[in-house]
């Protein structure tokens, strides 16, 4: 089994800049290779939200009317009291839901300035740094957030787009650890990714949280070349768990355990975030099971879809950039 090395943040930034220079009207790679990560945002064409790790300009699809109306309502509340932390958070979250990730980052940055001890500002800004491929900044934000919640009581985080059951399935602490793990995963820092996901898993918030973190823990152990530890990490996951929303992660873990065939797993729409998660999980399974051709073929197929803000899509970009 091949063991994959982590990629440094500086190398990642240079590679992203290089790709964008080759595929868009951005500054030449040789002029930017030694530049800080902030240079990436300066290279983004007007109207776009980011440059993909493969050099493609990423533009958000037009938002639906309800999403626009929700943003207008959140902005009105914010305008009435811009010094209220909750108002800033929801203004930023609603902005992000329209696909305006860079504007959301600005709003959460305002929140950081006004409320530097509020972990939620870093938690939500970090999410949008991931969306815009600024992984080093995401790691920095989530590390701060993790320190700020030390000794604090956890609380359920309200969903911006509730699932069918209308029941929130994540908490403030679990979201911070989950996204910190993801941020490290995307730069292939397996050790730190594993620590973060294990911490989030051990919170035991609910079965949704348990299956989602177990999925990443399993993948990380395999990427580190520890298949027996990977197997042990999902022994407690069963088909009869009370999963409310994270069905894609639950099914992936059951797939890893041999209870669902790969062809059934791939009967998903990769344009949907949950479908992208499944597509990446299966492709990654091929990768660490020494079938790179299948892995990269599948990744190439679904990075051609429109779900560029989904975590599976972003993770696949990293793999294709490094192959």
Image: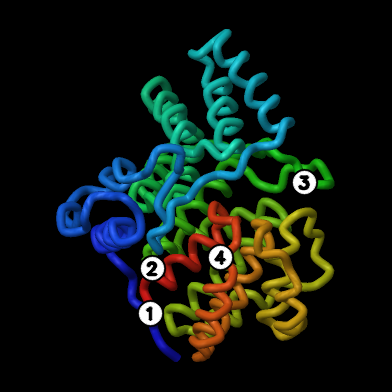
Disc 2, SS: loop
Q: Position of residue 196 (x, y in %)?
A: 47, 58
Q: Earlier in the sequence, mark 1 or mark 2?
A: 1
Residue placed at 19% from the left, 57% from the top? Answer: 33
Per the model, the C-alpha gap separating discs 2 and 4 is 23 Å
Q: CA distance from mark 4 to mark 1?
A: 25 Å
Q: Determine the secondary structure under disc 4.
A: loop
Question: Which numbered disc, 4 or 1, marks the residue that appears first in the sequence?
Answer: 1
| Helix, strand or loop under label 1 | loop
Residue corresponding to mark 2:
188
Q: CA distance from mark 3 to mark 4?
A: 26 Å
- The reply to whether callout 3 and callout 4 are in contact (CB within 8 Å) is no
Quadrant of the frame with the N terminus: bottom left
Looking at the image, do the residues carrying marks 4 and 1 touch, with CB atoms under 8 Å apart? no
User: Circle 3 sits in a helix, a strand or a loop, which is it?
Assistant: loop
Circle 1 residues within 10 Å: few <14, some 14–19, many ≥20 = some
* Closer to the camera in the image, 250 or 146: 250
Instruction: Indicate which disc, 3 or 4, sits on the residue closer to the N terminus.
Output: 3
- Residues tagged 1 and 2 counted as in contact (Cβ below 8 A): yes
Q: How many numbered discs, if any?
A: 4
Depth check, mark 2 against mark 4: the one in front is: 4
Toward the viewer: 52 or 156? Answer: 52
Rendering coords of residue 10 (x, y %): 24, 58
- Which residue is label 3 attached to? 163
Left or right: residue 68 versus residue 287 is right
Give the mark nearer the N terminus: 3 vs 1. 1
Label 1 sits on residue? 4
Marks 3 and 2 in Cβ contact (< 8 Å): no
């Amino acid at each position: 089994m091949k063991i994959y090395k982590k990629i440094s943040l500086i190398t990642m930034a240079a590679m992203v800049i290089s790709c964008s220079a080759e595929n868009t009207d951005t500054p030449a790679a040789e002029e930017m290779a030694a530049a800080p990560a902030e240079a990436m945002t300066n290279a983004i064409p007007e109207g776009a939200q980011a440059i993909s790790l493969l050099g493609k300009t990423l533009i958000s699809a037009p938002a639906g009317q309800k999403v626009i109306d929700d943003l207008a309502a959140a902005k009105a509340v914010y305008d009435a009291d811009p010094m209220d932390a909750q108002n800033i958070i929801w203004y930023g979250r609603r902005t992000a839901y329209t696909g305006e990730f860079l504007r959301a980052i600005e709003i959460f940055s305002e929140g950081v300035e006004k409320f530097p001890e509020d972990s939620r500002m870093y938690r939500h800004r970090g999410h949008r740094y991931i969306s815009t491929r600024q992984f080093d900044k995401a790691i920095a934000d989530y590390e701060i957030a993790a320190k700020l919640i030390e000794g604090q009581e956890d609380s359920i985080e309200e969903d911006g787009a509730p699932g069918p059951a209308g029941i929130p399935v994540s908490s403030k602490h679990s979201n911070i650890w989950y996204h910190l793990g993801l941020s490290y995963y995307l730069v292939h820092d397996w050790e730190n990714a594993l620590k973060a996901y294990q911490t989030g898993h051990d919170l035991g918030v609910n079965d949704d949280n348990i299956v989602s973190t177990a999925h990443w823990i399993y993948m990380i152990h395999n990427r580190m070349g520890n298949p027996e530890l990977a197997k042990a990490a999902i022994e407690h996951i069963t088909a009869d768990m009370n999963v409310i929303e994270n069905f894609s992660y639950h099914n992936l873990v059951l797939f890893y355990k041999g209870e669902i065939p790969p062809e059934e797993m791939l009967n998903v729409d990769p344009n949907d975030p949950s479908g992208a998660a499944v597509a990446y999980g299966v492709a990654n399974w091929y990768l660490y099971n020494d079938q790179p051709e299948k892995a990269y073929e599948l990744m190439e197929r679904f990075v051609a879809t429109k779900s560029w803000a989904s975590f599976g899509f972003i993770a696949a970009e990293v793999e294709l950039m490094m192959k």
